[in-house]
Amino acid sequence: MAQNCYDILGVSRDSSVDDIKKAYKKAALAHHPDKGGDPEKFKEVSAAAETLTDDRKRREYDSALLRARSRDGLRFSYDDREASKERRGSSVPSAPARPPATASEAAQRPPRPQGAVEIPSDPSSLSVKELRDLLTALNISHEGCIEKGDLLSLLKNRRGGRDNADSMPRSGAGTSEKPCTPRQRASDDTENRPGQANRTVPQGAATGKDSRAIRIKILSLGSENVGKSCVIKRFCEGRFVSKYITTIGVDYGVKPVQVLGNNVKVNFFDTSGGNEYKDIRVEFYKDAQAVIVVYDVTNRKSFTDLDSWLEEADSYNCPLSKNAKAGETPFVIVCANKTDLPRRVVSQEDGLDFAHRHGMYYYETSAATGDSVSEALTFLFEKVVSQHMDVRRKLGI
């Protein structure tokens, strides 16, 4: 169970569930890895929300706080503390102001180039967001870099290039060469960035086979409790969790796989089907290369709601149906899930008809038994990677 749950979300102990969900939405968007946030902080935020939005877990957590005499959720805001100090006439002396530098001290300081950006001696201590901000300040492209290691590699290469430049003679006054980042080098695979595999590669890009993993972005959509998370967990971990907690906002994970002889990193964005998390969910439609649409064969409404899911995706520039009037559609599979359960109310014919009308691929799956889960997702990955490789072959890369 997460610690300091209230403080992590910035709410008080008497906050309502709606207030907690609103605070989670704000925190999740601020810290989500796909938005440049820190993955560890995002996990803390998600764990805190999971605890405080579940009545039983929240009661147990509140009881533990009382026993430990914790002040989690009882702290004043900074403004309240300052106002309280003024009302009390705080006797704590403020820190003395630092005297301005003398002319001799200022003269001894080495001049700092205008617009120079300082690189920390240990950049690994920075969060993902701080690394992104630093790379942006250094004018280093980092689009598509999700993992912290990739961002550090870009920064390490820049530092190495700068050190080498300092030890080499200048080619002449007035001659400046733009630093070459890992993503700009001829040996790099530019289209391997998330959201880039379906796009053409400009002339003069990388040639030859690259050892860097191809990154693909996969989105899951569907109503609550249809088994989206369980399908993904079954594929990634080969197991089924019978009492799965409803997804809060968006869950994110990376699964390395081999697809058609290529190293691939599948970036899963497992969305919540709850309408209260729509504001978070819609932020992740952009650049999805493939989508897993899931419904429950024992729940007729989850099937009839599929049309509204297609409408939502289309309204946020992610058309899923072949009938969409504009935009390039990602590859889509329809998973008729929970086929292991009795009392089926949505027939195979209904599911096949829906998939055929919208130009999608249809699979009958069971996250509980694992039936067709691996086959469905592997097929989806192969479609994305195959298109990616076709683009490379056409361009002679």
Image (cartoon, rainbow, N blue to C red):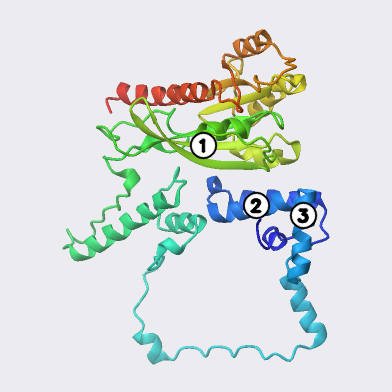
What quarter of the picture does the C terminus occupy?
top left
Residue type beneath disc 2:
Ala
Q: In front of the other: label 1 or label 2?
A: 1
Q: Quadrant of residue 384?
A: top left
Mark 3 burial class by Cα count in 10 Å: few <14, some 14-19, many 20+: some
Kindly identify which numbered label has been placed on residue 237. 1
Mark 1 burial class by Cα count in 10 Å: few <14, some 14-19, many 20+: few
Cα separation, mark 3 vs mark 1, equals 29 Å
Q: Are marks 1 and 2 in contact (CB under 8 Å)?
A: no
Residue 242 image point, x, y percent:
66, 35
Q: Quadrant of residue 309?
A: top right
Q: Which residue is mark 3?
A: 58
Residue 188 image point, x, y percent:
31, 40
Residue 119 image point, x, y percent:
39, 65
Cα separation, mark 3 vs mark 2, equals 12 Å
Cα separation, mark 1 vs mark 2, equals 20 Å
Q: Is residue 385 above or below residue 150?
A: above
Q: Secondary structure at mark 2?
A: helix
Q: Is residue 152 above or below residue 206?
A: below
Residue type beneath disc 3:
Arg
* Relative side of 255 to 83, left or right: left
* Relative side of 64 to 195, left or right: right
Q: Residue at x 69, y 11 (%)?
A: 347
Q: Which residue is mark 2?
A: 47
